[in-house]
Image (cartoon, rainbow, N blue to C red):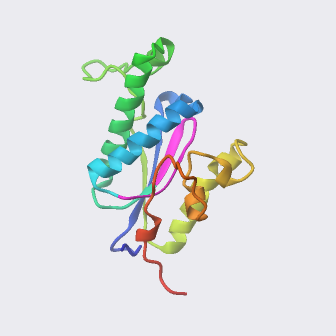
Amino acid sequence: MLRITKDSPVLFLTFVTNCRLPVFRSDRLKAIAASAFAEAAISGQFKLFAYVIMADHVHVICSNDRTPSDTLRFLKGISAKRIIDHLKERGFDSSLRKLRNRKRGKKQSHSLWQHHSNTFFITTEFSFMQKLNYIHLNPVKEGLTALPSEYRYSSARIWQRKPFPDEPIQIEIDLIEWSKR
């Protein structure tokens, strides 16, 4: 069990697509990203507590078992590989051109994510709930759905204890130990 405190914070991560390209407009690419994030959590040995995948950015709340840069390396690295491989296999040349890495000397020729990501340490239950609500309201604010639970690529349904049988990502809400109030 994890108790959210100053000594054991959880991470609120935001990462944005390169040039804010709306890479995740299609459900297929969102599904690939969701699968990659689940794989990253297993490979990186951290827990996912909440997420939303928007057209050009992702928000994640996860355990702080690794350094933030390591956690981001797993999330961004695995998802970038899966998405770029999919685009190459399907011949999405115009999308790949937009994601082309313009810096010389780089090993990879394409860059899905912006280099800089936002990392925030959540140290209180109150702050956790603020970030959780912010994440889940993203699709509503963008006009994609009327209710957070209607957006497929979000953990909102799981937090409402009404998950779909085929949730894109299984998250670990029962591992958080809440203080008694």
Quarter of the image for residue 25 reads top right
Q: Is 57 covered by the magenta stretch?
A: yes
Q: Is residue 20 visible?
A: no
Point 40% across, 69% down: residue: 175
Magenta segment boundaries in residue numbering? 47-60
Quarter of the image for residue 134 reads bottom right
Point 56% across, 67% down: residue: 129
Where is residue 24 drawn, in percent x and y? 54, 33
Q: Quadrant of the N terminus?
A: bottom left
Q: Vertical placement of 88 versus 116: above or below?
A: above
Where is residue 110 drawn, in percent x and y? 37, 22
Where is residue 52 drawn, in percent x and y? 54, 48
- The residue furthest bottom is 181
Where is residue 169 drawn, in percent x and y? 47, 49
Q: Is residue 44 visible?
A: yes
The chief SS type of the magenta part is strand
Q: Is 93 covered by the magenta stretch?
A: no
Point 58% across, 65% down: residue: 161
